[in-house]
Each structure stands twice: as C-alpha cells, then as structure tokens.
Amino acid sequence: MTRQAAVESSSSWRLSDRLGLAFSWFLGLFFCVICAAVVIYLLVQGVRYLSPDLLWTNPKVGFTQNETGGFLAPLLGTLFVTSIAMALATPVGVGVAVWLSEYGRPRALARVVESTVEMFAGAPSIVLALFGLILFRASFLGFLTEKTGGVVYGKGFFPAGAMLSLLALPLVVTSVREGLQAVPNHVREASYALGKTRIATIRRVLLPAVRPDIITGSMIGAGHAIGDTAIIVFLLGDTYVLQGVGNVPVLGTLRGTGSTLTSYVFDNAPTGDLNQPNKAFAAALVLLVMVLVINVFVDIFGRKARELKWT
Amino acid sequence: MALEDALLPLNEDDGLSQDQRAELWLGALVCAVIVLLLAMVVFIVAEAWPSFAHNGLHWFGSGGNVDQQIEAIFNSSNHLHQAVYTFHAWPLIWSTILTTLGASGLAFICSLFISIFLVEFAPVPVQRVLEPVVRLLASVPSVIYGLIGVLVVVPFIDTHLVTHGENASVEPVISLTGGSLLAAVVILTVMIAPIMISIFADGLRAVPRSWIEGSLALGVNRWRTFWNVAVLSARPALVAGVVLATARGLGESVMLSMVSGSIGFAPNPVDGLIFFFEPSRGLAATILHNTEQLSSPPMEHTLFAIAAVLLFSSLMLSLIGWATKRPMSRYFLIGGVSR
Amino acid sequence: MDLTLEPPPVRQLEAGATLTVRPGRGNASIHRLEGLAPETTFEHGGHHTVVPTLERMRVERLSIHYGQKQAVSSVSLPVRQGEVLGLIGPSGCGKTTLLRSLNRLTELTKSASISGRITLDGVDITGLEPTALRRRVTMVFQQPNPFPMSIFDNVAYVLREQARRKPRKPTLAPLVEEALSRAGLLEEVKDNLNHPALRLSGGQQQRLCIARALAANPEVLLLDEPCSALDPQSTKVIEDLIVKLREEVAVVIVTHNLQQAHRVADHVAFMYLGELVEYAPTRALFAAPREQRTKEYVGGAFG
C-alpha cells in the first residue's frame, strides 16, 4: 500500500517547544486581528462621515462640523507635496545607486556614501523638519518661499517636498541598488564587448533592466512621504487652503503654503486645534486608501516584475 | 541617438572622457548628498549650542518642572538680553527611554516568534494572509495610529483600567486620563514590530538549507532546529531589524504626542501598577508640541537642542548595530570568504 | 528482486594471531541473524578483530514516488553493522533517494509517497518518531555543512539537544573528544576546540560532520557521497576512517566513484533507474558481475 510520506508532527516535541509553537500561532493571529480591527474601524467610522462633497470642498471657517467644509485642499496638498518629493528623490536616488553599484571609487568614499544613506534612513523625520527650517530660512534660498521685508518665511510646498525627498531617498537607493546588484555581470561584459562606454551601458542596458526596482522604490518612498506628518507640520505653513505666492501659476503654489491630509487629520483629532473627529475619520480613511492602493500596486507590480527577471 | 549608439567611438579619448564626465557628475551628486548630511548635523548642533552652553550637563538632568521651564523660556523672548535657557530635560529623556526600550523589547519578542512562524511553521494559507497584514501594518501613517489611539485606546484605558482610587492617589501631582505610558508602548510596539518582522523573516529565509537539513538529520526536531540553527545564523539580520525599528521608535513624534499624555512628567516605577498609567511626553513629541513657539529664539535653541540629542541617539544606534555585527562575522566565514 | 543474503566475507586468520572480541556500539541487542555467521573477522594494521554481525536495518520491497515519477522501485536490502554497504549507480538511479529514506529525510519533500517497509532492529521505522530515528540513523552530506559555531559546539550539538537538562561543558568535553577521535580529527584540533568550525579545511569540515554524527552514538551512519567535494588526500583520510568505523556502526555509503566503492565497501548494491539490479560482495560484483547492466556500468560504459 502506498502512503503519503508522514510528516514530523509536533506531538513528539517537548512541552516547551509546543508552548513556543502555540505562542507563535497566538501572536500571528493576534496581529492579523489587530490589522483587521484597524482597517474595519477606520472603514466603518470613515464611511459614516465621508461624503463625496468632503472631497471637493475646501475647509471653511465654521462652528459645527457641518459647516467647516471638506478637505479638498489638504488632498491636493498631499498629492502636490508627494509629487515634489518623488520628483527630487527618484533621480537623485537612482544616481546615487548607480554610482554605488557601478562606480564606487575611491572605496573610502563609497563607504561614506553608504553610511550617509543609512543615516538619512535612521534620522527621525522631526529632525529633518528642523533642518529644513534652518536651511530654507537662509536668505539665498529666499526665492523658494515668501519673503516679506527681508525676512525669509522659509515654509512652503517646496521646502516640505525637499525634506520629504530626503525621507524617501534611502528607500529608492536601496531598491535600485539591489536591482543593479542582481543584474549578472555577463550582461555588462557583453555590452562593453560591443564597444559601449560604461555610461552608455548604464543608460541603455542597466537602467531599463532595473526599471521595476526604480518604480517599486519610488512607490515605497511615496508611501512614506504621503504618511509623514512632522515635516508637514513644520514646513508647510499653517494655511488650510492652498495659498500661493506671486502670480506665476505652478511656481506660486510651490512657494506657497497649504496643508495635507496628514496635518488635517492631526489638527482635527481630539488632541488637535480643531477637534472635529468626524472630519478626521473621513480624511484618515482617504489617507489609508491611498496608502493601501500604493501597497497593493507595489505588491502586484513587484511580483510580476520578479517573474520576468533573469531566470 | 540611434546613430550615435551604432557607431563605435572612433576616437578612444572621446569614449573615455564621456565616461569620466559621467563619473564626475555622479560623484558630485553623491558628494552633494554627503554635504547635505554634514550640513544637517552642523546646522542643528550650531542652533542647539546656546541651550547646551547655558545648561551644561544639567541639560540632561532633572530639576524643576520641565513644562514650566519651557513656558519660561518662551516668555523670556520678550527680554532678549535676559533670555532664560534653564532646561532640565530628564523627564523627557526618561519618557523617551521608557517608551522606546519598552516598545523595542516587546516588539522584539513578538517579531521573533511571528517571523519564525511566518517563515517555517505557518500553513500556506495563513502565510498568504499574514505577509500582507505585516506589510499593511508597516505602511499605516503614524497619524492614523495616533487617531485610533486617541479615540479607542486612551478612552479604554481611562474608563476600564484606571480606577478612581488610583486617580485619587496621584491627584495632587498629575491626573490619570488615559493618555499614558501603556498606550504609548502598546501602539508603538504595533508600529515597529512589522519592521522587525520583515527584516527578521528575510534573514531567516536566507539561512542555507544545508544547515537546517543537517540539524534535522541529526535527530533534532523542526522547532529546535529552527531556533538553534536558523536564529543563530540570522543574528546579523536580528541586529539590523532591532536597530532600524528602535530608531523608528526613537524618532516617533506624532503618534506619541497624541497618546502618551502631554505632560512633562517622569513616570515613577515605584508607583507600582499606576506607573503604566502615568502620562509623559518624549523628546520628539515635545518638539512637535511646541511648534508654534518656534518664533522665540531661546525656545528655538532649546528645541534644536532636543533635536540634536535625537540625532545623535539615532547615530549612536547605527554605530551600535555596526559594532555588534563585526564580532559575529567570524562565525560566518564560508571558504574563507566573509558573508 | 528476491533477497538472498550472502554470508559475510570471512578473512583468513594467520596462524598464531590473537582474537579480540569487541561488542558492537549502539543500544540494541542482537536480533535476527537469519543463518548468518554470527561474527565477522577483520584484519587491519597487523591484528585481527572479530565483531558480531548485526543486521541493523532491513529494506523490504521499498518503492518511492515523487508525484508521478518513480524514484525507487521495489528494493530490498539488508544493512549490517560490521560492514560497509555501497550504493552505486549512474546519476538519477535512486541511490540517494534510497539513502534518504533510511532516515526518513524523504519526508521533507511534500510530493513523496512510499510503499514497502524499512525496519531498524526489527521495528518499522514509520512507527518511530522521526527525531528518535534520526538519532540512531545519522547522516553526513555531500557538501560539508558544519554549523556556524565553534568546533566544540558543533560536536556537542546533538548531546545538548538530547539531554533533559543542558549539560555543562566539563560533562560534554570527554564525549566531544571521543567523537572527534573516532572521526580521526582530535589530534588536529584539540587545541582549538573553540575556534569557528567554518575556518577548517574542506576535509577537516567533513570529518567534523562525521564526528558530529557519531556524537549521537548512532547505530547506522549514512554517507551521501561524502568525498565528492574533497581533494584526494582528504578523501583517503576519510576512506580509512570509514573502514575503521564499520566495526562500531553499520555504514551505508552512496558513491559515484567505482574505485572508492571497491576500496571501501564490503557489499555493493548496483542501482539503475530506481531498480536494484545486483547486490553482491564487492569483489564478486566487480570481478564477476552477474547482470548485463552491471557488467556495462562496472566496465565504464555509462555513469
């Protein structure tokens, strides 16, 4: 008689081993429960208070939660500031990763660069926020924000976006660097053998090959940028509505102030200035959905890209 | 463009200098990044210096009510020639130590068991659920954790865990309203555990199968094999995970400012169970709490001083992580080549 | 194929030589001898040793499938202490699968299904707990795989796992040294027991793996092409070691090197495409193979 090969059961283990396994099960399921609870709670509360008009009306001054309008401006603010952050972080991140992976001379410099990226990764976002504050108050950078009577304001979309890009930078660098290291050397050698320069190889062969990693790295970085509050609170200025500076359309908004979904939730939480929990829930739901969508996208995209790799 | 690529560089020098130019540009880019980091450290320390200079080592000590000191510092900006800098940050430091170490310790235990479970012992359907769950928990913005903390966890502690008797006993000093050490540690644990889990799991998955098979073939059961061999081999990953997660917990400002109670109070372990319900405020949360007061120069220097302490703490953490990995590497030589 | 048990080889004693009788290692008492001569006599290094020939394991009509593919078909073999059983055959003939079924490592592959019976000292091994079985039937792999610990900790690994309470180092030290000496490694490492095991050379690492396997005091030692990753010198050292070990444990060795099988094995089983083609004492199989396929393989036609 043919039987399925018997698998080691845990019944032969010592009691302490079995307790350990049971504890693992418990913890694993507990975390699933917490996650479900968080998502469901936000879903329930958010859907209760989220009405479509919240998405396209701006915050207004008012006394009750019905009068204070929606969060269109914060929503646009989130999108805008994240775009700035990724527009800065992606090219710089790719450049740093390429240098580390393909050049990297002298070796001491490479190690310093690696440590630098690691330190940016470990730096608390509030420290980055304060750094941004000093940086953008310097008068030579005054053109980036409002300047009234010789005093540079130092806050605005660009400063916030710039500091957020520092937050996202290590993530892009790590992702692209791993991708580049995964490319087998014979690909590079084949390109050199055809007479291509190193930079041409990078541009024509390597970068297209790691495009999935660039995208996933950027998406993960964007997710972190969307979720950050500390930098926004310090650097975006305190206006709830987008307030541009000057007459040039996009540049005006860049130099201007506003808010994002994260600062909106922060202000509307019971601990914040406005204390409108219902609005906070609605905005939090929208925020969570954005982050979820990015997560799912990274998952699916990452899986598909891995299937097409160097197998 | 196509033509340029099709032609081999006729002049050897041209091809080389193209590469050299590219290397120079990229080198300039990475140097700019390094300069940015140095600028950050220098600027922050420079702005922080007045606060340290005025307080000396007492900056880190205790003495007086730290909230009142902050008040005084802010108000003193009106008399700039008599600026007050007195600041004894111990309650804030103690709160940061308690929350960070508490959450890291708790998260380490949970993450170790969960990652072992995830990599080796979970049935496939459970794995397929648990992995996205961990990733999702890692990407939830901290302000949302704060919101849920304030609306669910804090009231829960207030109504169900804190008794009237306990409240009365500490009445003169502070009031227990639910914003507490317990809330902070629990939520921070949930925030940083996913970071540890994914790094631990990666490390465990990278353990060579030959070691695991070798241990099984010697008659050691799967659970003990995994703990003895895999966890042992994955120690560098464990260190990396702990360092990264602790750095994250150290710098957390938003969530903590919402749930840990907003009083500069140093929780006292001697108080017994009440210790867990006592409010406090960490270093990062204090900076966030006083954003509006930044216009006052002495206040600004004080806040930058706090930021400097945070910055150096996270730098120290990375250093500790790097230092603990070195002695471990001698056990991981394979064929003389370090892994 | 029908199992006919050949009498074990008896080597001639020289006149005037002394006989020493040593009991075999392991915990089982002598079971079925089935018409075998109760002892095997060995000569080496000038003196002679006589050991009881114990049949440790018996494989009866074993068939193993991986999904649809049949890896082993209806193989029957004895595994005896006091002799080395060599499994030879071309790649993919099932010899490694057969070896791994002896300590139920085949169970690690989900798609494996098994029919037939394997017994250890008369007891069906599926009735034993896998961990208990694997302490009595240990295995050394093709690639040396010492753990990332010190030499001492590697050898003491199983000893620490087996004990109820963690034994202290002084208790373990003599056992570790004994295992290392049985594996012929003690002299080379006895001053460096706390050094990382991964710093040893390939041959030393493999002997360490053997010592680690022997520390459990097994009854059967399985060797899966143990020398294929090593240089000729280390190979010779290990082959000598195997020949010495067979007095104490039953040894089964899988090898693709026919010369090695000739040097080391007492009985050889030739497998082809999952079938046991021929099983005979070494000299008989190599000098006068009965089956045509054996003749072709041993003559070097394939494999």
Image (cartoon, rainbow, N blue to C red):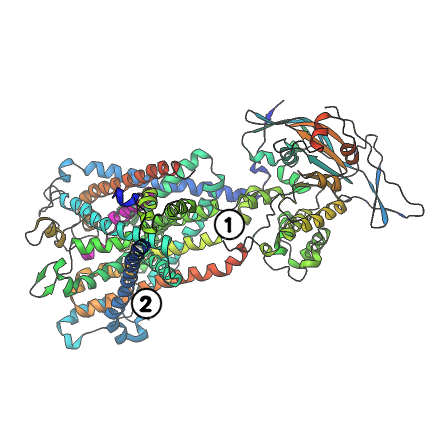
Label 1 is placed on what type of residue? Val
Q: Which mark is residue C239?
A: none
Q: Are marks 2 and 1 on the same chain?
A: yes
Near mark 2 (Cα within 10 A), the count class, few <14, some 14-19 or many ≥20, is many
Is residue B25 among what the camera can see?
Answer: yes
The disc, 2 or 1, on the residue closer to the chain's N-terminal end is 2
Left or right of residue B324, residue B48 in this image: left
Residue position marked by numbered label 1 in the rendering: B231
x 45%, y 52%: residue = B237
Near mark 1 (Cα within 10 A), the count class, few <14, some 14-19 or many ≥20, is many
x 46%, y 40%: residue = A25
Percent position of residue A37, x then y: 32, 40
Is residue C165 among what the camera can see?
Answer: no
Location of residue B284 by image quarter: bottom left
Q: How many marks?
A: 2
User: Any magenta on residue A198?
Assistant: no
Please tell me which residue lies in front, B3 or C109: B3
Give the residues drawn in magenta, as a range: A212-236
